Amino acid sequence: MLQTLSNTAPPTIDISSNSITRAMVTRENRYTAGEPFVNNPRMSCRNVNVYYGDKLAINDVSIDIAENEVLAMIGPSGCGKSTFLRCLNRMNDTIDICRVTGDIRMDDMDIYDKNIDVVPLRAQVGMVFQKPNPFPKSIFANVAYGPTIHGLPASKTDLDAIVETSLIKAGLWDEVKDRLDQPGTGLSGGQQQRLCIARAIAVGPEVILMDEPCSALDPIATATIEELISELKQQYTIVIVTHNMQQAARVSQRTAYFHLGDLLEVGKTNKVFTRPVHQLTEDYITGRFG
Ligand SMILES: Nc1ncnc2c1ncn2[C@@H]1O[C@H](COP(=O)(O)OP(=O)(O)OP(=O)(O)O)[C@@H](O)[C@H]1O
Ligand SMILES: [Mg+2]
C-alpha cells in the first residue's frame, strides 16, 4: 500500500535529523484534511478499514455523509472508492475474502450489528452501478420487483402508483409510459440507467449510492442523469463515485479524495477543487496524477 510520496513531505518534518523513516513520513502525510464531519449526518463512518484477505484496501477512514447532500468520491483507479461505497450498504458482505472493521452508522443504527437484516438495509441504502443492469423483464416488472418482495404495495393499484411515481422521479415516465410491458433491456443505455435509478427509488431508499453511473453513457444521457441527481438530492442523500472531475464539480456539494486506500481530503466541493490542502489532491484534480 505504501508508496514513496517525496513531494508531499511537510516542511516541519526533517527526516534527515531524526529516526523518522520515509514510510512514516509518508503515512503522516496521509491524514484526512478538510471537513470530514458535518452537523446533520445521515451516515457516519469512523475508523473504517477494509481488507481483501491480508491486503488493506481502505485505511482508517472516518467521514460523515450529510442529509440531502451529494457527496462525490474521486481518486485514482484502485484507490478504494468502490470498496468504500460498498461498505455503506454492506455489499462487501457478498465478497468472501472481504472484511470490514470500524463503525458505520445510519442515524444511530450500527449497520454492521449482527442483528441487522441486510435486505431492508440495501433497500434503505440503494445502489446504482456503473453498467446499467436491468433485469431481463418488462420495464414495469423491473420497478415493481423490489416493492413486491419487500411487501410494500397493498394492492395492484398501489403497485401501479409506486411504479409510476418512481419512473417520474427517475425522469423516465414520459418516455416509457406507453410501453411498460416491453423489456427493460430494450431501452437505450441512458434510459436503462434511469430505469435502474427508478428501481432503487421504488423501495423507498434514504441514501442512493452510485458507482460511476454515467461512465457508460454519452454526454446527453450523462447530462440527463446529472440533472436528475440534482433533483433527487431534495429527497435523498446521494454518494456518487466519478472519474469525471467536471461531473463531481457540477453535481456535488462535498467531495472526498481517496488515494491508495486513504481518505486524503474532504470538504466543500468548491474548496477541494480550488484550494486543496494536499499536494496529491491538487495533482489529481489538475490531471498531473492518476
Ligand atoms: N473482490 C476483490 N478481491 C480482491 N481485491 C479487490 C477486490 N475488489 C477490489 N480489490 C482491490 O482493492 C483495491 C481498491 O479497489 P476498488 O475497486 O475499490 O478501487 P476503485 O477506486 O473503485 O477503482 P476504479 O476507479 O478502477 O473503479 C484495489 O487494489 C483492488 O485491486
Ligand atoms: Mg470502482
Image (cartoon, helix red, strand yellow):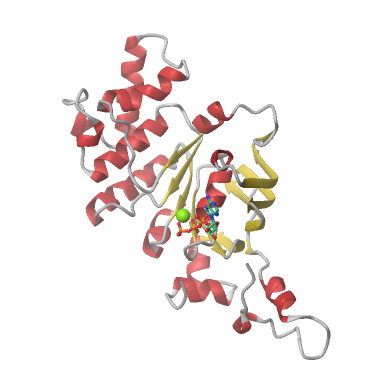
**Residue 91 visible:** yes
Outermost residue toward the bottom? 16
Residue at x 83% of width, y 86% of height: 18
Residue at x 64% of width, y 71% of height: 2
Residue at x 35% of width, y 16% of height: 159
Outermost residue toward the left? 178
**Residue 40 visible:** no
Q: Which sits in the foreground, 88 or 220?
A: 88
- Quarter of the image for residue 179 reads top left
- Quarter of the image for residue 153 reads top left
Percent across and percent down for residue 173 are: 24, 31
Percent across and percent down for residue 72 are: 48, 55
Looking at the image, residue 181 sits to the left or right of residue 124; the answer is left
Percent across and percent down for residue 208 are: 47, 40
Outermost residue toward the right? 18
Judge whether 126 appears above or below 82 on screen: above
Percent across and percent down for residue 257 are: 54, 63
Looking at the image, residue 103 sits to the left or right of residue 242; the answer is right
Judge whether 115 appears above or below 212 on screen: above
Residue at x 56% of width, y 31% of height: 121
